[in-house]
C-alpha cells in the first residue's frame, strides 16, 4: 500500500517525539533545584477604563465603553423593572420574556428571521433587579438592526397567542423544576434566606401563574420600560456616527415617569434548618448562608478575600478539608451573591448521604478557624495572587470593562472607585484585619440551612413537603 504524504508527516512527527524523549537533559537543567517553589506574585489589577456618559434627546442616559479593535457593537437596555418593583408575583419576568414575542409591525417569527439574517438575536438576560434587552451586531449592520431593537422596546405586541404559549412553557418548566433536586435546593435556600414574600426569596408556583393576566403584564411593562426608568449600555467600536444612530433610535423611546424606590419586607431573623427528603436520591445537597451582604458595605472588598479563603477557589479551606483530605465530596464552595438591595454569602455542597453529618460539622469547623485564628501570610498571599489574576483576566479588553459597568448599573454602585478599593484591599489587607472581618460577618448561628436528598432525617430540621403542589396540571 503506498504511503500518503499525510502518513509521512505523522511518521516524521513520531520520530521527532521519540528522539526528544530519549535525549538526556542538559546539565544546566539537572542542576536546577526543584525543591523551592517560585515566589507568589500578586498581579496588578488594571484601573477601570473610562466610560463616556451622555443623554439622548429623550433623557435616556447612555454609558458607552469604546476601544474595541473589531467592528462590533453590543447594546443593552436596562430598566428598573425587575422583581423588586413588582406589584404582583412573576409579572416582571413575564413582561421581559414577552417583549420579544412580536411588535405591532412584526410577528415573533418575523423578528427572529430578521435578526438571524444579520447573524444575531435579541436576548433577554435573566437579571433579578432589572429588565434587560440586548443585541450584539457588527457595526456595518447597526443602522439596520438597532431601529428594530428600539421598535421592540417601544411597540411590543403582547398578543394573546404569545401569552398562552408563555404560560404553557412556564408551567412545563415548573413541573420539571419541582423534580430536580438542585433546583429545589436553590428555591428553598433563597426562600429561607430572604423570606417567602421578598422579591429575592419567593418562588413561583402554579397558583401564581393562574393569577397572571395579560393586562397586568402590559400595565407593568409600560410603567417601567421607558427612557426615564432605564440606562443604555453600549460597548464596542463607538464614534460620532454611533451616537447619532443611538439618538435616532433609542432617543425616540417614550420618556414616562421614573419609578419610586421599592419598600422591601425584612428578611427572616434567627437560624433555620429545613430538610426535604428525597428517598431515592443517592446524594444530599447542603445549602447554607444568610442575607445582609451588601456590595456597597465598606467591608465588602474584605469579604471577597474572606470568601475566597473559605471556599471561593480550588485551593480554599473547604475544598482542602472536605474534598482533598476527607474525600466527602467532588466539590464544595462558597460565594457572595449580591443584588441591588441586598445579598448573601452561601456555602454549597453535594455529598453522599452517609457523609451528611460529617460535612456539616466540618463546615462549622472551618468557619470557626477563620473566626479564631489569623490566616497565615503564605495562604493569604496565594489568595491575593488568585484574586488579582482572576480580576485582571476579566478586565481584558473593553468588553471586560463594560461588564463591570453593567454590574454597577444593575446594582447601583460607582464602579471605578469600587474596583480601586477592591484592588487595594486584595493587595494590602492583613491577617489581623481579615480576622476582624470574619468575626463580624461569619455568624453561623444566623445562617439558614437547607438539606435536600436521600440522607436520614435530621432531628433538628424542619421537614418540607415534597413538593406541595401536584405536577399534573
Image (cartoon, rainbow, N blue to C red):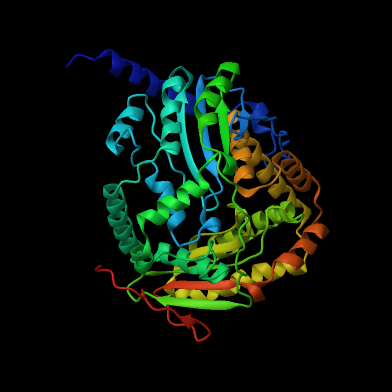
Q: Position of residue 460 (x, y in %)?
A: 53, 85
Q: Residue furthest bottom?
A: 459
Q: Residue at x 62, y 43 (%)?
A: 409
Q: Position of residue 104 (x, y in %)?
A: 34, 36
Q: Residue furthest left?
A: 1
**Is the N terminus in the top left, top right, bottom left or bottom right quadrant?**
top left
Vertical relation: 115 (above or below) 89: above
Q: Residue at x 52, y 36 (%)?
A: 76
Which is nearer the eye, 81 or 380?
Answer: 81
Which is nearer the eye, 236 or 53?
Answer: 53
Q: Is residue 35 visible?
A: no
Q: Position of residue 190 (x, y in %)?
A: 52, 65
Which is nearer the eye, 387 or 291?
Answer: 291
Asked if residue 375 lies left or right of residue 470, the reply is right
Q: Residue at x 44, y 52 (%)?
A: 219
Q: Residue at x 36, y 76 (%)?
A: 468
Vertical relation: 180 (above or below) 354: above
**Is the C terminus in the top left, top right, bottom left or bottom right quadrant?**
bottom left
The number of discs equals 0
Q: Position of residue 326 (x, y in %)?
A: 54, 66
Amino acid at each position: 500500500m503506498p504511503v500518503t504524504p499525510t502518513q509521512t508527516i505523522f511518521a516524521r512527527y513520531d520520530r521527532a517525539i521519540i528522539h526528544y524523549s530519549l535525549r538526556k537533559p542538559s546539565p544546566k537543567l539537572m542542576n536546577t533545584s526543584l525543591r523551592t517553589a517560585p515566589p507568589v506574585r500578586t498581579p496588578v489589577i488594571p484601573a477601570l477604563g473610562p466610560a463616556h456618559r451622555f443623554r439622548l434627546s429623550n433623557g435616556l442616559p447612555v454609558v458607552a465603553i469604546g476601544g474595541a479593535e473589531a467592528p462590533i457593537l453590543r447594546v443593552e437596555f436596562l430598566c428598573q423593572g425587575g422583581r423588586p418593583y413588582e406589584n404582583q408575583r412573576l409579572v416582571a419576568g413575564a413582561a421581559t420574556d414577552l417583549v420579544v414575542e412580536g411588535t405591532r409591525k412584526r410577528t415573533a417569527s418575523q423578528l427572529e428571521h430578521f435578526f438571524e439574517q444579520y447573524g444575531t438575536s435579541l436576548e433577554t438576560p435573566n437579571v433579578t433587579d432589572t429588565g434587560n434587552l440586548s443585541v450584539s451586531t457588527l457595526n456595518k449592520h447597526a443602522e439596520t438592526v438597532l431601529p428594530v431593537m428600539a421598535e421592540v422596546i417601544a411597540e411590543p405586541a403582547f398578543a394573546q397567542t404569545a401569552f398562552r404559549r408563555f404560560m404553557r412553557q412556564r408551567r412545563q418548566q415548573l413541573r420539571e423544576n419541582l423534580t430536580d433536586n438542585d433546583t429545589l435546593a436553590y428555591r428553598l435556600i433563597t426562600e429561607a434566606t430572604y423570606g417567602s414574600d421578598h422579591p429575592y426569596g419567593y418562588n413561583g408556583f402554579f397558583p401564581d401563574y393562574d393569577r397572571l393576566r395579560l393586562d397586568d403584564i402590559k400595565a407593568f411593562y409600560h410603567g417601567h420600560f421607558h427612557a426615564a426608568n432605564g440606562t443604555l449600555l453600549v460597548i464596542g467600536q463607538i464614534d460620532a456616527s454611533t451616537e447619532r444612530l443611538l439618538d435616532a433610535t433609542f432617543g425616540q423611546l417614550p420618556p414616562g415617569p421614573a419609578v419610586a424606590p421599592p419598600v422591601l419586607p425584612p428578611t427572616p431573623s434567627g437560624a433555620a434548618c429545613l430538610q426535604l427528603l428525597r428517598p431515592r436520591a443517592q446524594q444530599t445537597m447542603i445549602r447554607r448562608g444568610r442575607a445582609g451582604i451588601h456590595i456597597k458595605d465598606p467591608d465588602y472588598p474584605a469579604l471577597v478575600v474572606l470568601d475566597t479563603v473559605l471556599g471561593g477557589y480550588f485551593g480554599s479551606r473547604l475544598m482542602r478539608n472536605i474534598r482533598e483530605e476527607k474525600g466527602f465530596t467532588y466539590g464544595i464552595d462558597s460565594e457572595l451573591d449580591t443584588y441591588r438591595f441586598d445579598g448573601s454569602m452561601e456555602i454549597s455542597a453535594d455529598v453522599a448521604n452517609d457523609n451528611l453529618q460529617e460535612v456539616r460539622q466540618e463546615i462549622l469547623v472551618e468557619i470557626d478557624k477563620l473566626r479564631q485564628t489569623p490566616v497565615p501570610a503564605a495562604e493569604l498571599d496565594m489568595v491575593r495572587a488568585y484574586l488579582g489574576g482572576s480580576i485582571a483576566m476579566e478586565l481584558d479588553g473593553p468588553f471586560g470593562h463594560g461588564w463591570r459597568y453593567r454590574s454597577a448599573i444593575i446594582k447601583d454602585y460607582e464602579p471605578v472607585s469600587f474596583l480601586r478599593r477592591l484592588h487595594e484591599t486584595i493587595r494590602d489587607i492583613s491577617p489581623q484585619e481579615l480576622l476582624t472581618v470574619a468575626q463580624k460577618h461569619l455568624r453561623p448561628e444566623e445562617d439558614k440551612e437547607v438539606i435536600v436528598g436521600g440522607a436520614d432525617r435530621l432531628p433538628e430540621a424542619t421537614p418540607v413537603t415534597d413538593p406541595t403542589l401536584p405536577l399534573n396540571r
